[in-house]
Image (tube, rainbow, N blue to C red):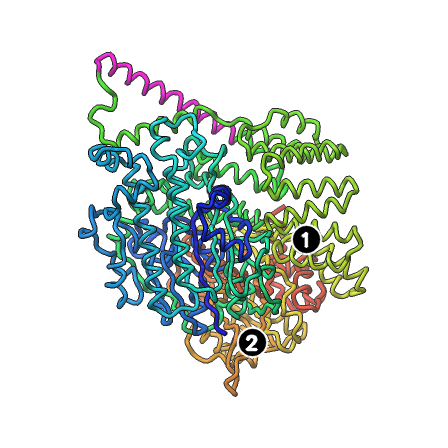
């Protein structure tokens, strides 16, 4: 039977608000859903920005894979900043996969879903549909252009739209009960207040979404229905400060007016949920989620911090997950679930394969049946009618401006100023910061360092960048850099304090002069100017109060790394006022006790940290480590399981679980834990080494164990976390390396299905930028016994005296022509330049018309960018085939972009790939030869290399070594 799936998103919904309302009988529909199904926490991702998170939900991938990197983007045509759109998304969402597989979808309000995608089997109502800005009443409102697909539904949806002006005082009294006790004049006065206008807009927007969703569910075919409500998040940002218990800085009159808004908002969502459930029917699988929570208690902020997307600091790290339906278990507690798990789970529920390049997992524990999980390398490589946008899709600039104002009003972005170039530069910087944070959240701290170092150099007063960089230095054990960074950060913060003191004194002096003249400093100012004035004052006073505890904590981290554990204890005795920072300092204090072998004190301190943050996976992980060191592995196992239940996505936790299980003599369970650790943190050598130990001692699989040990050694040496390799030769090219993006690390696990197929089925791909050493590697592979797939049309010349090893068919990869010729390349090596790598198909049709899956393994040749440009320039000059490029800096950036696009594709596709330094490889570096052997399951010695390699390259390598000395 073909089941339907309804996915409902409530932005920022939190169990801390929901549970007391259910206990009071105020949310009956959600209560029934929980009773009949499975429920639990849903761990969010960092950065906790909704457009990024809801795209991760829809794709099963982290932001550095899906491409949505913030609230805004740069229009590639005009260069102006605009609100984020789905045009920045670079991977298929769940509705694209459904469309491709002949299933019908309806998507309403998803963020971002504008412009709506041209789905052949679906309906999409974009996230701009519900907005009512610029219209005082329903008759003035015009539906934004091109926000509905297909267009035939636009007139119907225009009628379904609900305008805030349609709300009566009776409707609003559910949210503001005081309205019932007011006179008509008092009601009018209150409704004209900014808070009430905001409240009415939020209610109107979510009512429009619900109206559109229920109308479409009734009248359009669907297998998957996705509907997103942002109202709970907006209720929180606007009114959580008024939620009980009353905060000291909130006026009593305002508290009485707005204290029920958030609870009423949840109750209204429960009413809308009831409507959706009735429309869906009992035979539909329903999943209700939120992307994060929202602090409703003592953790509420008095003021929004002066930092990038400051309002996100009000979010809590756990959202909600509830599932109910004929294929969902009843009464199942969900543990360890993440936003990344939603898409894989929906695909599995609907009988579709899960992409191996997705970062999430199927929540099989909630399934009523136990059928196996099918998978494919990547849906992005499966051709078909997916309904994605074409490359030439454009947006309406006027509509962009209105939507941008909405983000400014919500506080997520600052109003772009200083011209489009400055605004675009700021947006790029924010994207880079968010990308670095995404890498950090995924455990790729080295890749984050390569972004944060130049970014912090460019924006030295963005202290948030400094703290992120310090965290990365700590995680990657670059203590000498951390030691140099901390005093620099402190100096900058104290300088900022001094400048703020001077500015405050100037403001006070001006105010005193005006008061002497009996003038109000804000006289004649508009409401907007008054708000800006007070916001500036708050920011200045925040600068006057630097949090020195944070710097003291970082100094203690340096002490810990250098073995001064008593100093750590001294520095962490006076702990931070901020709860999460206090918990972090307590963990560091506990680790110091542990290194001093004072395990009971370490456990006592971690228990205190856990009492402050009971839902912290890090605290449970710390306790697991301490109990293991105290030789209590069974207790350690309980805590590590608790940590994983809170956050499944931490590879280090699964590694520790494998270690504990092995100590408990459970090698089979340990192996499974280590395989999960390798998938989640493929750049960490520890899991490879421990798995190799089990394979060697328990399974007697010496070959696989040897390969894993070699791989672990090569990972440790090559710095898979993204650190750029040291420079070799500085040629005469004008390349500004500080402006050059680092190479994206190839940190995919090599334990893939390529190992389970015959080497005769695998296509060995040699790639890299032109003149990076690809032809040389083809020669090496031929010497090693792998036949080249080459037509020899391009003959040897002065630039490549031993031949180019190319095939003209490779040039057809970017064309919509059959690729069956790739079947002839199986068991052979082919040369594909980096720009064409993403064009490699995952499947092709054979002569019988049947689809055949292709298996690849890729060797990326790495050569300093300045050497590549110099080599290309010489070749162009010799061939006289074109003009020399004058802007070397731009050329370097473009070449690196091509290179990184190919490497990203490998990450997404899960294809085994390694990067080989040209100069280190030809020099016979053991690390590079180990990587070569691990990927190809065959070895080549340094003496053999000398038989193959052009001696001119060896001379170049010797010259490089001399220059380094």
Residue 338 percent across, percent down from the top left: 54, 53
Confirm whether residue 918 shows in the render: no
Residue 468 percent across, percent down from the top left: 52, 40
Range drawn in magenta:
489-518
Does the magenta stretch mainly form a helix, a strand or a loop?
Answer: helix
Residue at the disc numbered 1: 685
Residue 903 percent across, percent down from the top left: 52, 60
Q: Residues within 10 Å of mark 2 (few under 14, many from 20)?
A: some
Residue at the disc numbered 2: 853
Point 50% across, 37% down: residue: 466
Q: In this view, does 202 lie above or below 520?
A: below
Confirm whether residue 128 shows in the render: yes
Q: Which of marks 2 and 1 is in front?
A: 2
Q: In this view, does 534 lie above or below 410?
A: above
- Residue in front for this viewpoint, 269 or 861: 269
Which residue sits furthest left? 139
């Amino acid at each position: 039977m073909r089941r339907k799936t309804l996915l409902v998103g409530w932005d920022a919904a939190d169990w801390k608000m929901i549970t007391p309302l259910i206990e009071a009988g105020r949310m009956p529909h959600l209560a029934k859903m929980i009773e009949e199904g499975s429920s639990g926490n849903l761990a969010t991702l960092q950065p906790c920005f909704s457009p990024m998170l809801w795209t991760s939900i829809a794709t099963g991938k982290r932001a550095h894979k899906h491409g949505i990197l913030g609230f805004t983007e740069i229009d590639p045509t005009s260069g102006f900043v605009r609100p984020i759109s789905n045009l920045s998304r670079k991977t298929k969402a769940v509705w694209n996969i459904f469309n491709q597989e002949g299933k019908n979808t309806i998507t309403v309000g998803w963020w971002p879903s504008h412009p709506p995608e041209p789905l052949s089997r679906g309906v999409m109502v974009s996230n701009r549909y519900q907005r009512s800005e610029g219209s005082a009443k329903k008759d003035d409102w015009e539906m934004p252009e091109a926000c509905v697909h297909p267009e035939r539904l636009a007139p119907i949806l225009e009628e379904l739209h609900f305008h805030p002006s349609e709300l009566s005082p009776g409707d609003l009294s559910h949210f503001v009960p005081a309205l019932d006790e007011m006179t008509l004049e008092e009601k009018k006065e209150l409704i004209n207040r900014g808070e009430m206008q905001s409240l009415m807009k939020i209610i109107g927007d979510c009512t429009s979404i619900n109206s559109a969703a229920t109308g479409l569910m009734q009248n359009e075919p669907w297998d998957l229905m996705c509907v997103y409500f942002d109202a709970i998040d907006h209720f929180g940002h606007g009114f959580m400060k008024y939620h009980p218990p009353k905060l000291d800085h909130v006026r009593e009159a305002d508290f009485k007016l707005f204290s029920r808004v958030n609870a009423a908002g949840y109750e209204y969502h429960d009413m809308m949920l009831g409507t959706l459930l009735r429309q869906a029917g009992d035979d539909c699988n329903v999943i209700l989620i939120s992307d994060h929570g929202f602090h409703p208690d003592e953790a509420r902020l008095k003021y929004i911090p002066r930092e990038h997307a400051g309002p996100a600091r009000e979010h809590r790290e756990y959202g909600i997950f509830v599932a109910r339906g004929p294929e969902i278990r009843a009464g199942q507690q969900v543990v360890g679930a993440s936003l990344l798990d939603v898409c894989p789970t929906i695909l599995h529920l609907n009988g579709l394969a899960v992409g191996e390049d997705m970062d999430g997992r199927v929540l099989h524990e909630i399934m009523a049946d136990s059928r196996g999980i099918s998978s494919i390398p990547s849906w992005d490589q499966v051709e078909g009618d997916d309904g994605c946008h074409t490359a030439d899709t454009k947006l309406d600039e006027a509509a962009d401006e209105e939507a941008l104002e909405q983000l400014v009003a919500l506080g997520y972005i600052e109003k772009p100023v200083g011209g489009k170039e400055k605004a675009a530069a700021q947006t790029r910087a924010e994207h880079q910061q968010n990308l670095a944070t995404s890498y950090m959240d995924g455990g790729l701290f080295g890749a984050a360092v390569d972004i944060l170092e130049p970014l912090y150099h460019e924006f030295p007063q963005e202290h948030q960048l400094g703290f992120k960089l310090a965290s990365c230095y700590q995680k990657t054990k670059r203590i000498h850099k951390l030691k140099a960074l901390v005093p620099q950060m402190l100096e900058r913060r104290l300088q900022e304090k001094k400048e703020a003191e001077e500015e405050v004194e100037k403001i006070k002096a001006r105010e005193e002069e005006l008061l002497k003249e009996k003038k109000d400093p804000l006289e004649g100012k508009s409401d907007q100017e008054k708000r800006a004035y007070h916001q500036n004052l708050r920011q200045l006073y925040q600068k006057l109060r630097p949090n020195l505890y944070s710097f003291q904590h970082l100094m203690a981290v340096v002490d810990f790394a250098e073995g001064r554990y008593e100093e750590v204890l001294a520095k962490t005795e006076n702990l931070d006022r901020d709860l999460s920072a206090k918990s972090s300092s307590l963990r560091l204090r506990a680790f110091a006790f542990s290194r001093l072998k004072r395990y009971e004190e370490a456990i006592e301190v971690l228990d205190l940290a856990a009492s402050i943050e009971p839902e912290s996976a890090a605290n449970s992980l710390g306790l697991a480590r301490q109990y293991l060191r105290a030789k209590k592995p069974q207790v350690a196992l309980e805590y590590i399981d608790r940590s994983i239940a809170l956050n499944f996505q931490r590879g280090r936790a699964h590694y520790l679980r494998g270690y504990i299980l092995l100590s408990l003599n459970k090698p089979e369970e340990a192996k499974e834990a280590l395989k999960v650790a390798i998938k989640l943190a493929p750049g960490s050598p520890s899991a490879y080494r421990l798995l190799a130990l089990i394979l060697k001692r328990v399974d007697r699989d010496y070959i696989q164990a040897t390969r894993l040990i070699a791989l672990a050694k090569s990972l440790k040496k090559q710095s898979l976390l993204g650190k750029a390799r040291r420079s070799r030769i500085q040629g005469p090219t004008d390349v500004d390396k500080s402006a050059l993006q680092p190479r994206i690390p190839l940190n995919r696990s090599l334990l893939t299905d390529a190992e389970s197929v015959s080497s005769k089925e695998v296509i060995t791909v040699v790639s890299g930028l032109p003149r990076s050493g690809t032809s040389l590697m083809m020669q090496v592979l031929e010497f090693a016994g792998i036949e080249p797939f080459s037509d020899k049309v391009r003959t040897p010349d002065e630039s490549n005296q031993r031949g180019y090893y190319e095939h003209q068919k490779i040039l057809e990869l970017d064309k919509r022509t059959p690729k069956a010729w790739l079947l002839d390349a199986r068991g052979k090596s082919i040369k594909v330049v980096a720009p064409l790598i993403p064009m490699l198909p995952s499947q092709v049709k054979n002569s019988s018309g049947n689809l055949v899956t292709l298996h690849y393994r890729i060797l990326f040749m790495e050569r300093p960018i300045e050497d590549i440009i110099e080599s290309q320039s010489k070749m162009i000059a010799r061939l006289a085939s074109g003009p020399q490029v004058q802007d070397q800096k731009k050329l370097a950036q473009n070449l690196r972009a091509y290179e990184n696009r190919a490497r990203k594709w490998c990450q997404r596709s899960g294809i085994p790939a390694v990067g080989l330094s040209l100069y280190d490889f030809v020099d016979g570096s053991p690390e590079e030869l180990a990587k070569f052997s691990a990927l190809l399951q065959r070895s080549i010695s340094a003496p053999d290399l000398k038989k193959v390699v052009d001696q001119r390259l060896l001379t170049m390598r010797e010259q490089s070594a001399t220059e380094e000395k």
